[in-house]
Image (cartoon, rainbow, N blue to C red):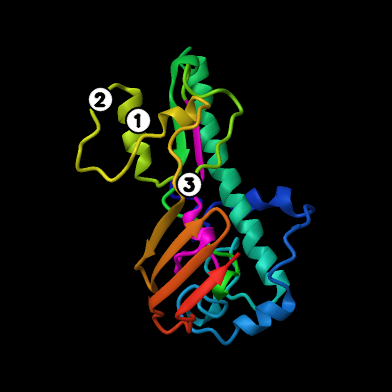
Amino acid sequence: YWDVHRPYKMDPSWAEKFENEPIEKTWPDEETIKKHQSIKGLFTAQGQFRDNESPFPLMPGSIESRKDFEHMINGYDAAISYTDYHLGRVVDYLKKEGLYEDSVIIISADHGDAFGEHGIYSDHVCADECIHNIPLIIKWPGVAPAGASNSSLLYNVDLPATICDLLDIPIPTDWDGKSFKANLRGYQGLEREYLVWDHALYAVQRAVRSKDHLLIRTYDDFGYGFEPIELYN
């Protein structure tokens, strides 16, 4: 489903349910958004659309205030709601046909989006937490206990290796991914001390993510003005 990716093109009515729902995230505040106005480049506060004019009602032409930011967040939530509705149609069909109980359902994503981090809004530019921390929801009858969660440091390339393992298919020896089947079953399984993240679309960066820290090194800031080395706790 492409719909949750910018631009948010669904009917604006999908945002109506969020009109009276306050956005609890207080950052970025007005002061931060003001500072972001000077950052140049695609998907910055002033780099959303040509001439700061949005052709999509669910997206502001630029991010110049907290109101603009909330406009974008409501659009993002509308896109998630729209996608959730269509996923629900698939689930309803499986239930109607008596297939749901035996069906494996896996929901994930290729990347997250920034909403103010590093001055970027609504896309991916950096090797950052908001970009590389992606969702993974698995319903696998007889394997994954309902409602269980796992906080192990995993790569997206571990997923195909895990699927092979669960289906008793040999994992190709030249694959980088490793199976986290044991994690799914609720046991202590695959656990890395840290992950290495790359990003090479727009800014070129590499990051190391441990449980407590994120270190980002910028090789080419693509004009965004990022610091060469950044460390976060």
Q: Amino acid at mark 1?
A: Ile
Instruction: Give the quarter of the figure containing the C terminus.
Output: bottom right
Which-is-in-front pick, marks 2 and 3? 3
Residue under label 2: 169
User: Which of 184/80 is in front?
Assistant: 184
Residue 233 visible in the displayed image: yes
**Which kind of residue does numbered mark 3 sit on?**
Leu
Q: Position of residue 143 (x, y in %)?
A: 47, 21
Task: Indicate the secondary structure of the residue bearing disc 3.
Answer: loop
Q: Pointer 2 and pointer 3: residues touching (CB < 8 Å)?
A: no
Q: Residues within 10 Å of mark 1 (few under 14, many from 20)?
A: some
* Earlier residue among tags 2 and 3: 3
What's the amino acid at mark 2?
Ile
Q: Is residue 135 above or below residue 209?
A: above
Left or right, 140 with respect to 52, comes to: left
Disc 3 residue crowd, few under 14, some 14–19, many 20+, Cα 10 Å: some
Number of numbered tags placed on the structure image? 3
Q: Position of residue 195 (x, y in %)?
A: 43, 54
Residue that badge 1 annotates: 163
**For mark 3, what is the residue?**
153
**Residue, far bottom:** 38
- Cα distance between the residues tagged 3 and 1: 18 Å
